[in-house]
Image (cartoon, rainbow, N blue to C red):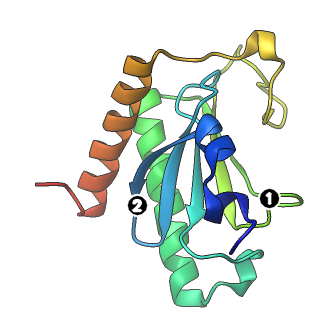
Amino acid sequence: MKGCYYCDRDEGFRELLFEVCELRASRVFLCKDQTLAGRCTIMYKDHYEEIFEIPKAERDLYMDDVCLLAETINELFHPDKINYGIYGDECRHVHYTICPKYKGKLGWGKPFVLFPDPAERIYLTDEEYEERINLLRTALLRKSGKAQS
């Protein structure tokens, strides 16, 4: 849908999110802000504004993808808890922010912070992003049965 942040994936989008891979019903993106290691966004592949609008069979596939991503983040980054954010007031495309939480780190015991104070944000080097993206992609595609040959 034209004018949708997730559908357009313009320059502003690409400054905040790095594409990891496509799953059965979704696309996975690593968040540039890695203050909480492994934080990702997973968007439904087509434009819907409400999760209940997605046909049930497709919604079930999407939820399987969400669970696969959360399980993979848990295995790779060992958070103490995973939070799931699904909002959409301004960005009206079904998506979840999968936010691993760590005891003693930003936001523990509270709802996760989408945009922490700039002084608290952790950004990686290009090489570190590439390494993290490849780690996630390899694990997700292997677990989903879509492993690259």
Residue shown at 67%/48% (left/top)?
97
Judge from the rendering whether residue 85 lies leftward or rightward of residue 144; answer left or right: right
Q: Quadrant of residue 108?
A: top right
Q: Residue lying furthest left in this view?
A: 149
How many discs appear?
A: 2
Residue shown at 27%/44% (left/top)?
138
Q: In the displayed structure, would residue 68 be above or below residue 55?
A: above
User: Which quadrant of the figure contains the C terminus?
Assistant: bottom left
Residue shown at 59%/30% (left/top)?
32
Q: Amino acid at mark 2?
A: Glu
* Element on which disc 2 rests: strand
Judge from the rendering whether residue 138 lies leftward or rightward of residue 70; answer left or right: left
Residue closer to the observer: 3 or 117: 3
Q: Position of residue 117 (x, y in %)?
A: 84, 18
Q: Amino acid at mark 1?
A: Cys
Q: Are marks 2 and 1 in contact (CB under 8 Å)?
A: no
Tell me the residue that label 1 is attached to: 91
Q: CA distance from mark 2 to mark 1?
A: 20 Å
| Residue 31 tag number | none
Residue closer to the observer: 50 or 123: 123
Q: In the displayed structure, would residue 53 be above or below residue 83?
A: below
Residue closer to the observer: 5 or 83: 5
Q: In the displayed structure, would residue 34 be above or below residue 21?
A: above
Query: For the residue carrying disc 2, how many other residues have a C-alpha within 10 Å: few (<14), some (14-19), or many (20+)?
Result: some
Query: For the residue carrying disc 1, how many other residues have a C-alpha within 10 Å: few (<14), some (14-19), or many (20+)?
Result: few
Judge from the rendering whether residue 144 lies leftward or rightward of residue 71; answer left or right: left
* Element on which disc 1 rests: loop
Q: Position of residue 63 (x, y in %)?
A: 55, 68
| Residue 22 tag number | 2
